[in-house]
Amino acid sequence: MGFLNNYKTLGSYLLAYAVQESSESNILPVMDDCIAKQQLSVREAWEIGRHDPDSMGIRVDDDPIIPPQHKDAPVLELLRWMMELHK
């Protein structure tokens, strides 16, 4: 069962950070300081633009699905800007 299905069933989730002691070690979640959350916003990647706070969730090598009717999707400007930064 995936995260969104679990969230739909439970109505909440835990937000935590993780640590990796070395490049060879597993990434381990730290649950001591986790935060219980009840609200979650899920958006389509094509809706996220350059000045959107959610832009941190987009990577320069992402290939978002863009509906044909949205030829100038906000994410395209964001990806162009990110590509310029990575030159």
Image (cartoon, helix red, strand yellow):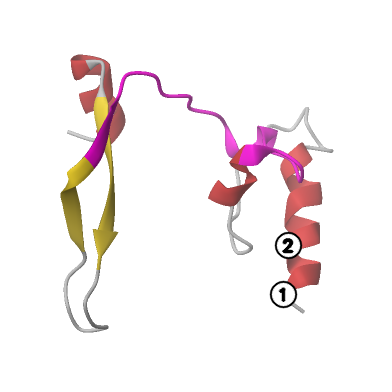
Majority secondary structure in the magenta region: loop
Q: Nearer the viewer, residue 69 or 19?
A: 19
Q: Is residue 56 magenta?
A: no
- 24, above or below 38, in the image: below
Residue 58 placed where, x, y %? 59, 51
The amino acid sitting under disc 2 is: Met
Residue located beneath label 2 in the image: 82
Give the residue at the far front of this rendering: 33
Q: What span is colored magenta in the figure?
A: 34-53
Pointer 2 with pointer 1, Cβ within 8 A: yes
Residue 85 placed where, x, y %? 76, 70
Determine the secondary structure under disc 2: helix
Determine the secondary structure under disc 1: loop
Residue 68 in which image quadrant: top right
Residue 37 placed where, x, y %? 31, 25
The amino acid sitting under disc 1 is: His
- 83, above or below 57, in the image: below
Residue 6 placed where, x, y %? 21, 26
Examine the rendering and report whether any part of residue 66 can be seen: no
Q: Nearer the viewer, residue 50 or 5?
A: 50
Q: Is residue 81 left or right of residue 67?
A: right
The quarter of the rendered structure image containing the C terminus is bottom right
Taking the spot 27% from the left edge, 83% from the top edge, the residue there is 23
Taking the spot 77% from the left edge, 37% from the top edge, the residue there is 73
Residue 53 in which image quadrant: top right
Residue located beneath label 1 in the image: 86
Q: Is residue 7 left or right of residue 31?
A: right
Residue 5 in which image quadrant: top left
The quarter of the rendered structure image containing the N terminus is top left
Taking the spot 77% from the left edge, 39% from the top edge, the residue there is 74
